[in-house]
Structure formats: structure tokens, C-alpha cells
Amino acid sequence: MSGEEGLPGFTYVVAREDVSDDGLEVVLKAGDAARALLVERYDLLTLDVLNAQLVIEPWRKKGLKVAGTLEAELAQSCIVTLDPVPARVTSEFTLLYLPEDVSGRRAMEVAVDPLAEEPPDPLPVEGVDLGEAVAEQLALVLDPYPRVEGAEFADAESSESGSEKKPNPFEVLKNLKTQD
């Protein structure tokens, strides 16, 4: 998911030629406008903080390795009560990028091996948008089912009002057999 609208103040594009052999350290802090776009994109209630510390290094001569840590303070809606569920998230990640002609993505056959390493992402000619990469990592660490502590769904049987015990269809068949 590339940010077509971009993340104002959180966009930091790095191309392979921008990174020396010693590497490059980058600190990103999302401003109000970028956080507002991410709140809308990921259906959050709030995103008060989103920071990332990144180290970008050359990888396999033409590629890039981005290793970093993201920190976020946010709130999501409880899936049961819709109350705010605050969360403080810290996540370490490593991303690998190679130009498409080197990574072989175009010629790669579709073979799924759950134990194999994930292939590197394509490295665009203009470079990698580190802000967008951090935003995508945030999406991966969000709780898919946030719940306020103690919130439970109502039991399906207790929600049936005035229901009698439903007849077992096999009881009917058993009674047919004994009538012979």
C-alpha cells in the first residue's frame, strides 16, 4: 500500500546512492498532519505518537537494508463495547530492498513456502519512502481485535429469548426405527 497522498512531514525518501558504506541513521517523528492521515487510514481513534529510529545500510551491492524500531501511542475501538482501547506499541523490524532486475520479482514463479525467508521488496528507482515503510509496519503491529479488559460477547444461547430445547433430529429418526 503506497501512500499516494503521502504523509506530510513524515516522508523521507532514500535511494541506494544516498547511502554510504558506513550506513545512514534516520529519526522520524510523525507530525499532526501525518498522524491524522494514519488515524483515518487505519481506523484508529487516536495516534498521539509515532516515532521511528532507523539504520539504512547497503545490502547486496545494489540493495538497501532498513533496520529500525517504531514507537507509537494510540487508541483503537473495542470490538465489543466501542470504548477506547489505549495501547503503547514498540516494534523492531528489518526490511530488505533490491532493484527489480536484481531481485527477480518479475520472473519469480508463485511458490509458497511458509518456512522460507520473505523475498526482498522491489527498490524503486527514486528510492524507498521510509515514512511509508514505518506506517506499513505500524499496520502490522496493530491489535486486530482490541478489547477493553473484561469485555465479553453475549453467549449465543442466552441471547435466544424464550426458546425451548430444540428437538434433536436424530431423536426423530430413532423413534421411526422403534415403530417397526
Image: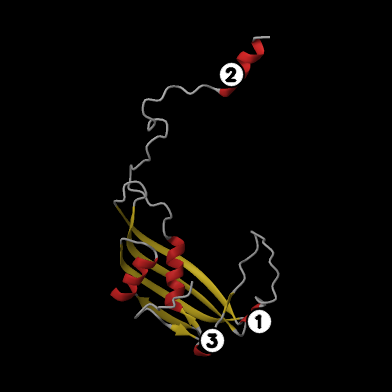
Of the numbered discs 3 and 1, the one sitting upstream in the chain is: 3
The label shown at residue 16 is 3
Q: Amino acid at mark 2?
A: Val
Residue projecting furthest to the bottom: 17
Residue at 38%, 52% (x, y): give it: 146
Is disc 2 placed on a helix, strand or loop?
helix
The x and y percentages for residue 46 are 30, 63
Residue at image location 30% in from the left, 75% down from the top: 33
- Image height of 136 relative to 17, above or below: above
* Classed neighbour count for the residue bearing mark 2: other residues with Cα under 10 Å, few (<14), some (14–19), many (≥20): few
Residue at horizontal 68 percent and vertical 66 percent from the top:
110
The residue mark sitting in front, 2 or 1, is: 2
- Asked if the residue under mark 1 is in contact with the one under mark 3, i.e. CB atoms within 8 Å, the reply is no
Q: Is residue 20 visible?
A: yes
Rendering coords of residue 55 (x, y %):
47, 78
- Residue 4: numbered disc: none
In percent of width and height, residue 85 lies at 32, 54
Which marked residue is nearer to the observer: mark 3 or mark 2?
2
Against 94, is 154 above or below?
above
Residue 31 in sight in this render? no
| Separation of marks 3 and 1 at Cα, in angstroms | 13 Å
Which comes sooner in the sequence, label 3 or label 2? 3
Residue 108 location, quadrant = bottom right
On the rendered image, what quadrant is the C terminus found in? top right
Which residue is identified by label 1?
102
Position of residue 45 relative to residue 30, above or below, is: above
| Mark 3 closeness class: few <14, some 14–19, many ≥20 residues within 10 Å | many
Q: Nearer the viewer, residue 16 or 46?
A: 46
Residue type at mark 1 is: Val
Tag of residue 172: 2
Sequence-first tag of 2 and 1? 1
Q: Point out residue 111 in the picture as x, y percentages from the top left corner.
A: 69, 64
